Amino acid sequence: MADGTPELPAPVEGTSGVASLVPFGVGSAGPSPLREGLAALSANADQLGWAWRVLRHGVCDGCALGSAGLSDDVLPGVHLCRRRLRELRRHTGPALTPSDLTRLPSLRARDAADLRALGRIPFPFVHRPGDGGLVRVAWDEALALVGEAIGDAGEASSWIVGDHSSLEASWALGHTARTLGSTRLYRRGPAHPALPLASLLGAPAATCTLADCFGTDVLLLVGLDPEAAPALARVVAAAKDRGTRVVVVAPELAPALEAAWLPGRPVSAVFGTRLVDDFLPVAPEGTPALFEAVLEGLITERTVAASFVAAHTVGFHDLPRAELRELVTRTGLARGQVEWLTELLGRARNIVSIWADAAVSMPLARVHLARGALGRPLNGLLPFLPGPGTEGARVAGFADGPLVTDGVLVALDAALSGLDGLSDAKVRVHAATHLDPSMLVEAREAVVVLPTQSLYEQRGGGTLASLDRRLRFSPELPDHPLVGEARPAWEIPGQILRAARPDADVPFRTTSAIRKAIEAAEPLWAGLGGFQAEGDALQWGGTQLAAGGRFPFPDGCARFQG
């Protein structure tokens, strides 16, 4: 290189190949696509027409890889993953029978899957201390109870949203919470892995797109749960077709990452595809230390992209140096394995990383900065979002962090199972499509369960976000089933606001009005306010968020220290 960085040979390309000579993955450790496809067909046999419309015309609400119908913006062919098939029944299932809810002890003995199997929530329900079961109530009664409790609680109310809520529902809930004086807005789910990037790169978002995986020298998959997004296998397989070397860093190699059977690829659908070229079995909690060690190695071996660092970053020479031996010990790897990864990344001209753990974000970003692997095609960082509603929750003001559970707790599309302190709440409100165990935990005065429509049923449609900064609109689909008295998730926060404060202005009568409000608050999302039809979408920030090494800071430079 002209800047004095050694010109090393490029990494050896990755290799493709079949995963098994046994057709359809039968008997393999990984999931069988044939078995899961038949299971989905059987589970939805009573609503095949509606199930097909959801798959064909709806934006996937299962993960943050973002298909619209059966296609995406990245690859030709069919985009249909196991997770979407597994969760299809959430949208096609019938209403539960209220008489099944009369015995709380038997309900509490069921796990989340058993409770979902009872069916969709059709009506509002309430249970108070001493009640034997859930009692059906009218919407007006349920909202009056919630409104009175929130009015009495004042600022002592907490508002929680999940990772699969639409942008519109999250925004409406945030508006209601702030109007009522609450600052307790929380997102329920794993820590947002993009948030730490803001202090180093200027924006809490992916720097590139999924298309940059195809043909990059090295694709790093760090700590990913393949079951959270089975469609990722499709991206990895396409990258390997173009010679990309795939390296997995995780405590264990998941069978679904080692090999996959992909319905959209005829040979792969039958014999599977090998996905991983190299695997580093890092210790639990050891991944941040691994990338700190890699950075130390790049500096020692003089494979830092010196001209990029000098022109496009600040703070490199002020980085505190770490003891390499201690870092290697924390990784749980042999020193030779750490040195191998350091050399691989030092030789790579192009690197894309996908990861899920927020603790890894800053060490990994520093490695990319040191190698100049940002701001140009085939390079970048793709933080793996927990769900397609994660980004909407961030923009609406919902923060990661420990939840405060006293006072009144309002949860929209957010399962609270496993959360300590649920019984400390005076009143809890759960708005969702299905029962989950957290709804059955007593509160001091009352638990209110409100039924919501699914994304594909709600009036005005809804918008979801993918990990590579794409926003996609999913319209209300025609001829959808009516599940009791379920209401749109985006509408319920306004009704709670009106019940708590009858004189308050409720500005959002339509989802279009909400989208226009979001666009006004987020200029980078220009165009969102016009979403109204199937296929409406945008990718904010362009294909490279830091194109040409220009980062969204006043001086245009990334930071090595946040």
Image (cartoon, rainbow, N blue to C red):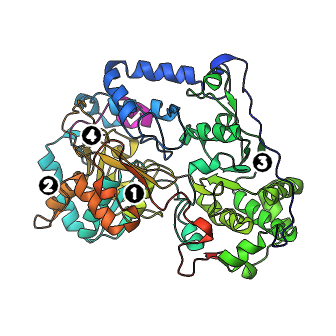
Task: Tell me the kind of residue under disc 1.
Answer: Gly
**Mark 3 Cα within 10 Å, few/some/many (few <14, many 20+)?**
many
Q: Position of residue 422 (x, y in %)?
A: 38, 54
Q: Looking at the figure, which quarter contains the N terminus?
A: bottom right
Residue occupied by mark 4? 476
Give the extent of the magenta segment.
107-123
Q: Nearer the viewer, mark 4 or mark 2?
A: 4
**Residue pictured at 37% horizontal, 55% vertical:** 161
Does the magenta segment cover residue 121? Answer: yes
Say which of 350 and 85 sits in front: 350
Say whether residue 536 is visible.
yes
Measured along the vertical axis of the image, is residue 482 above or below residue 309? above
Residue 382 location (% of width, % of height): 59, 55
Q: Is residue 440 above or below residue 491?
A: above
Residue 25 lies in the magenta-colored region: no
Disc number lying in front (3 or 4): 4
Amino acid type of the residue tagged 4 in the rendering = Glu
* Residue type beneath disc 3: Leu
